[in-house]
Every structure is written in C-alpha cells, then in structure tokens.
Amino acid sequence: MQHFPVFLDLRGQTALLLGSGEQAEAKATLLAAAGAAIRRADSFTPALLDGIVLAIGAGTAEAELVALAAACRARGIPVNVVDRPALCSALLPAIIDRAPMTIAVSSGGAAPVLARLVRQKIEAVLPPGLGLIAALAERWKAAIRQRLPALGPRRRFLEQVLEGEPSRRAAAGDAAGADRAMAAALASAEERPRGMVHLVGAGPGAGDLLTLRALRLLGEADVIVHDRLGCEDALGMARRDAERIFVGKRRGDHCLPQDGINALLVRLAREGKRVVRLKGGDPLIFGRGGEEAEALAAAGIPCEVVPGVTAALACAAGAGIPLTHRDAARAVTFVTGHRREGGVDLAGLVQPGVTLAIYMGIAMLRPIHDALLAGGMSPAMPAAVIERGGTPGQRVLRGTLAEMLAQAPGWVTEGPALLLVGEAVGRATPAWASAA
Ligand code: SAH
C-alpha cells in the first residue's frame, strides 16, 4: 500500500490554507464543509503552523509552497500542496460525500483523472439515499449492539436490514417508517448464528462472467471452500478476511477426497459460518454439486445453489460456435469423456442434429473418437477443442473429429479444454466470438 487512508475529524480544528485562486477556494469550501476553522495567508511564516492539524497550499509562489511543505514535515503536520505530489505528506482523494458516508479514491498522485473516473463508476452503482441509510444505521447502532452482542449474527442482521425494507424506507426519506421496520426486524432477529452453504458457480474463470449473486455471496462469506479450476478471479473478488480453504480437485489428484469435502462443509456450517463452496463453471454440471447438496441435506444444513456459466457455454461463445442451429442442430448434449468406472460410452449419443459438448475428454480422445465412430459419426464431422474458454487465455483449435484426435493432445497446454463435435460446430462464426 502506497498511502495509508484515514478520515480526519476537523470539527473545531484549525486548518491552514496558504495561497489563493480557484483551487484554493475549492479547498476552502471543502474544509468549511468538514467544519474546520480556516487560517488563510499568502506567504509562509512558521507561526502559521501553531495549533493547526492540516495544511493545504495552492496558488502562491513556489518558494512559499516549498517552505510550507518542509516546515510541516519537520513538525509532523500533514500537508497537501495541490498538484505537487512531491511536496505532499497527505493526499486529497477524489470524494463522494453522502454524509455520514464518505467514499474516497486516490491514485497516490499517479493519475488523479483516473481516480476521478473510478469515483464516477462507484457513484453510478451507489444506491440513492446512501447517506440516509447510513444515518439509519447510526441511529440504531447502540440498540443493535445490545440486542445482538455476538459479531457474526450482528453483521448478518445489518447486512439484511441495510439491503432490506428499513433501508428502502430510509432512502425514500421515510425515517419514521424506516425506524418502525428496523424495530420489527430487530425484534425477530436471530441471536444464534445459523450456518448455511452456498454452492456457487464461478464460471469459466473470467471474473466478469461471475453472476451478480455469486459476487454478493463472495462478499458476505465467512469461509470459501474452493477448487483450482476457474476460481482465481472469483477469489480475488471475495471478502478479504474470509477464510479460504483449497480442496483442489484435479483429475486423479484429489487434495481432499469427496467425503472429506462433504464433511468439511457440514462442519463449517455447523459452526454457524456462511460457507461459499466455489466451483468452476456451474456447480451442477460435472462439479459434484449434487453429491455435496445431498450430504448437506442429510445433515439438515440449508443449501442454496447459484448457477454459473458452464464451460460448454463459455467455449461456444468464445469460439463463435452455435450449440444449436435451426439448420444444423436441434439439441446439445453435455457429456463427460471420463467415467468413474472407466471407459467411455458415447456411441449411443451419436445422432444427426445433436451437438456434443464433451467435458474432461482430452486425455481420452482416442476412445472418444472410436466410440463416436462406432456410433456412426463420420471422422470428417466438424469439431473444435477450446482451451481456457471464456478467459483471456482462450485458444481454439478447429477442424474435423479426425484432426482433433491427431492434433489436440499435443496442442493443449495447461487446459482445461473442452471438445465440441457436431454439424453446428461447422457453422462457427469466429467474427462474433466474444472478445475474452
Ligand atoms: N462444473 C464445470 C465442469 C467441471 S469438469 C463447468 O460447469 O464448466 C472439468 C472440465 O470442464 C474440464 O476437464 C474441461 O473439459 C471443462 N472446462 C472447465 N472450464 C473450462 C474452460 N474454461 N475452458 C474449457 N473447458 C473447461
């Protein structure tokens, strides 16, 4: 971290403003809004620093600004000289003022315009009436703390009411209604933490293909139990102090066996934690989400599934391949090329007008190819292998089924990779492939 962010309470304090002009006036307005008394001067003398807690310089001679900065540093007084990062010990961020809520953004002086753009983006997603909502929380702070002394249940309660009826009323300016709704919610609040598990799909591995619900749950989780595949971006967006437990599943290399994962989820939920079980793609497609949901149900633990963009959809979009097409495919089948019992059983799936999306198939290409041919498929059937589909590292190999067999094993690098086969694969329009 380049700078330590801090918010100053300037009410009843004095700040020095050295200089004049448009920028100095803007800072004077800000200081006044924060309740500071302002001492103003155009040239620097050391006595100006007596009793001040902050100094700002703008719009006066260079020598005055340099003297101000040096004297402040010597006396440990935070100083900001507008547009002169080298002279600053304190930076003034771009701010959003929704008192009592203040949001500040700084680029550390590197790119103030960028900081302002970021501020605009934040502003666009803030709920209206944010200040009123924060004021509601402040009014109820003591009562909530008294009723819910334990941190976990209190935080959960606040998250609920701050996105629920009380805050909607507060934001609409109905403070009395907001207080009534808050009182009702508090009366029925649960004191005991109640654990639950969310089976969350992380999508193919690109952060911007997460669902908004996944993003919210990642921000609320106490603990995240995750795989390797597709989870990095999502983990980067999770609550910073959430515990992260890697149970890395790779084919044939289970860091924790499935029973152990099930038991872990049950134990964490019983401790009252909000658990996010994060899985690549969609949790219910070759992700063993079903087995985990069964284990949780058997243990009486509430469980919610949040769908994710599964590899077949991400790969098709990324490679510009229609999975169905009125002239070429009326069905699409998601199938694994890897069975628990070993062997592949794909011949029965070969039908005209069906696109096959074969997961976990690259290591099994020869038996897959043979099974498809045994089912009557032509070796000239259009096919594609997509590696890391839907992510910035996506690669696409196009050709026929026979070509995939010959080329894909040497072509795939780290994976993961998916095989798509069928007439519709020949209808690829790479031009509309999404820019990953
Ligand atoms: N639940 C996941 C699938 C897990 S099985 C989902 O819905 O996508 C693991 C297999 O999924 C891999 O062997 C590979 O075939 C496929 N896969 C997962 N992510 C992929 C990606 N980004 N690109 C291509 N294939 C992927």
Image: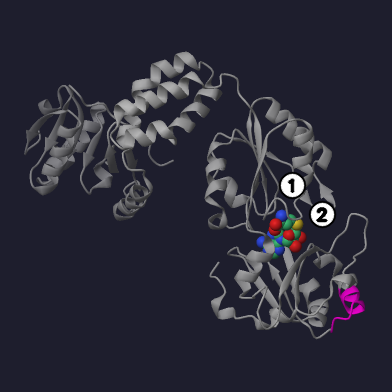
Residue placed most toward the observer, 92 or 436 = 436
Residue of label 1: 289
Instruction: Classify the position of the N terminus by image quarter.
Output: top left
Does 369 sit above or below residue 149? below
| Disc 2 C-beta below 8 A from ligand 1 | yes
Instruction: Classify the position of the C terminus by image quarter.
Output: bottom right
| Disc 1 C-beta below 8 A from ligand 1 | yes
Ligand 1 quadrant assignment: bottom right
Query: Residue 32: x and y, percent?
Result: 14, 33
Residue of label 2: 251
Distance Cα–Cα, label 1 vs label 2 = 16 Å
Q: Residue at x 82, y 79 (%)?
A: 406
Task: Check if mark 1's residue and mark 2's residue have beta carbons within 8 Å.
Answer: no
Q: Give residue 12's quadrant in the image.
A: top left
Residue placed most toward the observer, 307 or 277 = 307
- Residue ranking furthest to the bottom: 380
Q: Say whether residue 148 is left or right of residue 388.
A: left
Q: Residue at x 23, y 39 (%)?
A: 80
Name which residue type carries label 2.
Arg
Crowdedness near tag 1: few (<14), some (14–19) or many (≥20) residues, C-alpha within 10 Å: many
Name which residue type carries label 1.
Gly
Crowdedness near tag 2: few (<14), some (14–19) or many (≥20) residues, C-alpha within 10 Å: few
Residue placed most toward the observer, 419 or 117 = 419
**Which residues, given as a range, are shown in magenta?**
369-378
Q: Give residue 220's quadrant in the image.
A: top right
Let me know if residue 54 appears in the view: yes
Instruction: Please tell me whether residue 312 belongs to the stretch shown in magenta.
Output: no
Query: Residue 122: x and y, percent?
Result: 37, 48
Does 399 sit above or below residue 284? below
